[in-house]
Amino acid sequence: MNTEVQTPQKKRRNSKRKDNAEDEVKKEKLTTSDAIINRLRWDPSLPANDFVIGYLDRFLGIVESTLETHEWDEIPLHRIYYFKYKKLKVWDRNTRMDRISSGKIYRIMKEYDPDKVPSYAPEKIDPEAASDEVNDGQESSESESEYDAFREIIFSDRNKGADQYKLDKLELWLLTNHTNIPKQCKEYPTHISQKGGHYHLPTELVPKFVKKWADCINKEKNFYLDEIPTPLFRLFVDIDVKSTELDDIYDIVQTEWLNVISRYTENYFSKLKDQKSQVDASVVVTECHSNIEDSSTPTARHKSGYRLHFRSIFVDAQVHKKYITSLGLYLESQFHEYENQPKGWTFLDVINVKMCEHTKVRLFGSTKYRRGKDLDRKYTFLGVFGNNAVYDQHESDRLKNDLESLLFHTIVRYDYIEQEGKVQVMKFTQ
């Protein structure tokens, strides 16, 4: 009988051999380039002339060719590195990715040329499962790969995206489900990633998007999306209270700032033309606090951030800018200054008037991404306040226990909110 003692070192070596053996088994699962070529030649459901082969030329390096310009049997199989459908890689030797054998190729073809997919083409992928590469908390290596998903990310003409662009779970869902029409995404995006991706999400998919959004927050997944307001959008106010002291959180409730803002907002919109009924100035308040290093205000050491989402007031860009500017001046007339206020930081800065020039709204729970780094500044829920900043305990508790409803109340796009029909909308336009 073998009585050899398994030392910790031997156990690690044996474990490593086992892992290597498993890796070898996994490597064998990649369909060979020869099999892919034969599939393209003889499978009538795949238009061979739309595929590109990438191979290593001894003198020129990686070269791409099509069936129309090159007989594929002239290329040594061991020199083949990838296949593309039009511009998108669908088989890659280095990353061991194969979207042809897996059946995903038909979904890719539908994105480019729906008419080219024959009715008898097999659909081996469940569309719902394909739109969510993460199953029950299991990580998908494909979902976090560089933008080589079955759709290509659309960027603006000026911004080609961050280096080493990696898709987070929420952006992957958007990439899978949005319209994917370049002109629409560039000129009329509904969402823009802080890393550069442009997306246009149809209104009918908003409930599913909110569900995925809530799922990412619950699972503490980082995402980096900004929402782009419609011409008519929910009134929101960004407040940045900078301080010269570290860890100096400024409480806008205790200092009466929120009360003053609430009363001013109700009076401001009540006085606008043709507004006869009482204005509902109830507001969902989120907060985001952190120590900072800021070149624009060198003496600042901390920033207390708040975002006020007025539930029923909807404005256009001109009304928004006039309101924000007048609110900043009013706060200055009421408070003059605040404790530990940095030199040169005015109430117009506090109320973030410059934001009106380039309106983007960072999603609730989104990580802030600047210059290639994640900043620990995520908005969290503070509470719901009615007119005159009266704390609404019942509604606050309800939203704390219903994340999807809370997210709905932080959405600013009018088309998304109008579809739900859950909010009494009061419109103010120039």
Image (cartoon, helix red, strand yellow):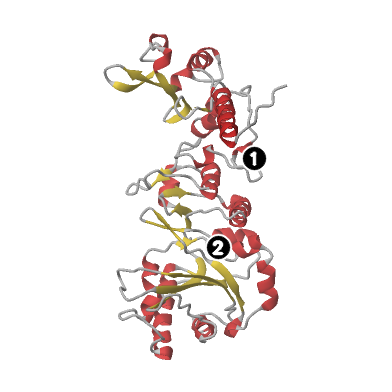
Q: On the rendered structure, is 402 left or right of 253?
A: right
**Residue 100: which quarter of the image?**
top right
Amino acid carrying mark 1 in the image: Glu
Q: Quadrant of the C terminus?
A: bottom left
Residue highlighted by disc 2: 411
Could you tell me residue 158's position as x and y percent?
32, 49
Q: Residues within 10 Å of mark 1 (few under 14, many from 20)?
A: few
- Choose between 18 and 127: the one closer to the eye: 18
Residue highlighted by disc 1: 128
Could you tell me residue 228's position as x and y percent?
46, 58
Q: Quadrant of the N terminus?
A: top right
Q: Secondary structure at mark 1?
A: helix
Residue at 35% over, 19% down: 56
**Residue 286: which quarter of the image?**
bottom right
Inter-mark Cα distance, 1 to 2: 24 Å
Going from the N terminus, do you reach mark 1 or mark 2 first?
A: 1
Residue 239 visible in the shown view: no
